Image (cartoon, rainbow, N blue to C red):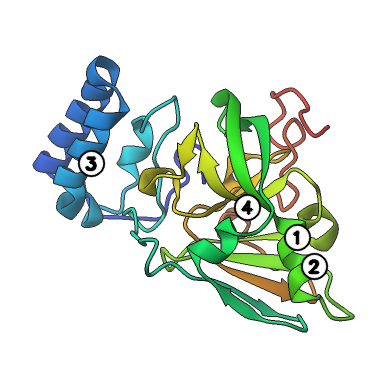
């Protein structure tokens, strides 16, 4: 999720330790790369969790991505305790483990990741399960026209129409950047909606609910476009929906 500059939930002032640490994190990322950044993020975790300002969205977490969480933290799930619940208007609801997802047919694609604020990470390698395959396995019932997604951060949500969700370039992503999806990139499992802005690609995916209508997600409730096609929302990016 990559919000527009300045559009963040209200929070508390940034403490001195948090501010100094975050600016150090940015400098460290330039000098030492993403491994060192992740180490510093772990050291700072108690402070940043108490600071819901979103300031850490200013800093990269490796390979040009930036970290942001509306819950002001990076939730953690291990392979042992991860579950993806598929519910709603389906004939066969399920609760899938990471191993279950890994056992399904996997696809790979290489696509840009585009933030609505303008920054872009080009040619990112992604891998995982097509969302359409999960929907087929669940069996949407008559009247199902949309899909709602929930994050195990306990706050963030998103939605797609059923037609959008069935596109071949919409993934339940298990890998990116030639490895498993990291905690700070939204792992172990995240959504990737290739033709739309990053706020649609929900991190820390915990739930897929088939619904009768599109339900506004977290940022749509704050004025963002429900249809977030790249090139059609912020008025300055090239169209990348093909």
Label 1 Cα neighbours within 10 Å, binned few <14 / some 14-19 / many ≥20: some
> Where is residue 28 shown, x and y percent of the image?
21, 23
Q: Are marks 4 and 2 in contact (CB under 8 Å)?
A: no
Distance, label 1 to label 2, CA atoms, is 5 Å
| Tag shown at residue 136 | 2
Question: Residue at the right extreme?
Answer: 142
Quadrant including the C terminus: top right
Would residue 3 be seen by someone viewing this image from the given angle?
no
> Where is residue 7 shown, x and y percent of the image?
47, 45
Would residue 217 be seen by someone viewing this image from the given angle?
yes
Q: Is residue 131 left or right of residue 19?
A: right
| Tag shown at residue 41 | 3
Q: Which residue is mark 1?
A: 133
Label 2 Cα neighbours within 10 Å, binned few <14 / some 14-19 / many ≥20: few
Q: Earlier in the sequence, mark 4 or mark 2?
A: 2
Q: Secondary structure at mark 2?
A: helix
Distance, label 3 to label 4, CA atoms, is 30 Å
**In this rendering, is residue 209 above or below 174?**
below
The answer to which of 143 and 98 lies nearer the viewer is: 98
Distance, label 4 to label 2, CA atoms, is 32 Å
> Where is residue 109 shown, x and y percent of the image?
68, 34
Q: Are marks 3 and 1 in contact (CB under 8 Å)?
A: no
Q: Are marks 1 and 4 in contact (CB under 8 Å)?
A: no
The tally of labels here is 4
Q: Which residue is mark 4?
A: 223
């Amino acid at each position: 999720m990559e919000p527009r500059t300045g559009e963040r939930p209200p929070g508390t002032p940034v403490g001195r330790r948090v501010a100094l640490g975050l600016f150090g994190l940015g400098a460290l990322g330039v000098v030492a790369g993403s491994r060192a950044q992740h180490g510093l993020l772990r050291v700072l975790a108690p402070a940043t969790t108490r600071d819901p300002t979103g300031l850490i969205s200013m800093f990269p977490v490796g390979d040009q991505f930036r970290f942001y969480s509306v819950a002001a933290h990076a939730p953690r799930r291990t392979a042992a305790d991860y579950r993806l619940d598929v519910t709603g208007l389906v004939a066969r609801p399920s609760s899938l483990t990471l191993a279950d997802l890994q056992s399904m047919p996997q696809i790979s694609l290489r696509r840009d990741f585009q933030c609505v604020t303008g920054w872009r990470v080009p040619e990112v390698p992604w891998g995982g399960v097509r969302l359409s395959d999960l929907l087929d396995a669940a069996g949407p019932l008559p009247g199902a026209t949309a899909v709602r997604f929930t994050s195990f951060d306990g706050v963030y949500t998103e939605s797609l129409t059923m037609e959008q969700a069935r596109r071949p370039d919409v993934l339940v992503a298990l890998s990116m950047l030639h490895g498993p999806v990291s905690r700070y990139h939204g792992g172990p499992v995240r959504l990737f909606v290739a033709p739309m802005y990053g706020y649609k690609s929900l991190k820390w995916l915990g739930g897929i609910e088939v619904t009768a209508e599109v339900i506004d997600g977290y940022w749509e409730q704050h004025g963002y476009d429900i249809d977030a096609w790249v090139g059609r929302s912020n008025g300055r990016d090239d169209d990348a929906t093909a």
